[in-house]
Amino acid sequence: MDTMDETATGLDRRRFLALAGTAALLPAAGFSLQAAAVPNSKRRMLQVNGYATDAETPVDALTTYITPNDLFFVRHHWNPTYQNVWRWNLTVDGEVERPVRLTLADLKKMPRASVTCVLQCAGNGRGLYKPVVPGVQWKYGAVGNARWTGVRVKDLLDRAGVKASAGHLHTSGADKPPGKVPPFNRSIEIGKALEDGLVAYEMNGEPLAPLHGAPARLVIPGWAGDHWMKWLTNLSAQPEPQKGFYMETAYKYPKEPGAPGVTFKPDEMRPVTELFVKSNITEAPSRARVGEAATIRGFAFSGAPDIAKVEVSDDGGQTWRPAALDPQHDPYAWRLWSFRYTPAAAGRVTLLARATDIRGSEQPKEAVWNQSGYLYNGWHSADIEVTA
């Protein structure tokens, strides 16, 4: 994919499905075991939008620590502008001593760094809010856990000589909006960028694909995907936050909860940043027998940056029992979990899962309603028909 020569081509539905079908035949280099762990019967994507093409991963395919590249969700605001890697470059400027312009080859000569962490669209779960809110109606699958490799933002800013006057890092990508739609420009606090930021050119041991922001994208572990600029072209250190629609209006969340359906005023909102604590059930039998144990599985994550515990309830949340956390984990990555459930009586049972992070934040029964449908994290459930 690195040799792709597309500079202004949209991804229509037919081409997306063709690419996805081809990718399904090619296990990710270095992660073939995780890819093989997802059976062919579950290897598919759910298209949730046609223009631009957006697709989520079925929750029953999110069963591995590393989400295979061909099963990783796809999010576009509009048909993207793919970059020719031979002409692409990244500019680092603003409040710096030495503005620099780097090619992909230049980036690859710098010290490599890797981070395994969750990428979740800020709108993941939007389709679960009541009343309905506008936007792409994601359910559970606009999320994945991947290993990203590239160059630390700190190393890039050190190379340019970032000044003490820089308080925010403005980010821009090559993506061009249609007509009078405002550009998707964002900024993040310089402290977060220096501590955790990564400019990634590999994903799960493979060159970053155009679908996911090639030649390079920004990775901000623990923060929602609106900060993860794709097709990255510019990092500009500035004293003040970025202006514009996608900073001043979009990607805002209420400071205090309000009743479902209420419209919050601008001064009642704050920017979306950290991911909320959340767990999902990925595997549960539809049927079970009294007295016979069944295994329930799932994943949990938080921007905290780790999970302390996951619990499961079969009585509507009155009592909870601990699930087992998989030992494999990294900061800001998800934790796989499992729970052995033995039904005590026949009938229909609803199992609930909730997570608690290392800061003590507990996943709520109901997500806080907001007019943009961001950061849904209500309890997830699975129904089981128990027979004698």
Image (cartoon, rainbow, N blue to C red):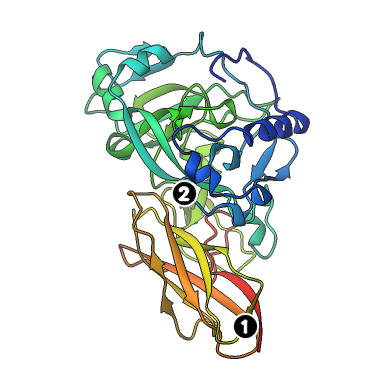
Q: Return the mark for residue 289.
A: 1
Image position of 387 with respect to 205: above or below: below
Where residue 198 sits, quadrant-wise, is top left
Give the residue drawn at x 23%, y 24%. Answer: 163
Q: Residues within 10 Å of mark 1 (few under 14, many from 20)?
A: some
Front tag of 2 and 1: 1
Picture quarter with the C terminus: bottom right
Where residue 190 sits, quadrant-wise, is top left
Give the residue drawn at x 55%, y 86%. Answer: 291
Residue 379 position within the rendered picture, expressed as x and y whole percent measured from the top left: 53, 69
Whether residue 337 sits left or right of residue 383 in the image: it is left
Image position of 121 with respect to 16: above or below: below
Residue 117 position within the rendered picture, expressed as x and y whole percent measured from the top left: 40, 45
Residue 266 position within the rendered picture, expressed as x and y whole percent measured from the top left: 52, 51
Q: Return the mark for residue 355.
A: none
Residue at the disc numbered 2: 272
Image position of 164 with respect to 41: above or below: above
3D distance between C-alphas at marks 2 and 1:
44 Å
Mark 2 secondary-structure assignment: loop
Q: Nearer the viewer, residue 317 or 176?
A: 317
Residue 128 position within the rendered picture, expressed as x and y whole percent measured from the top left: 64, 61
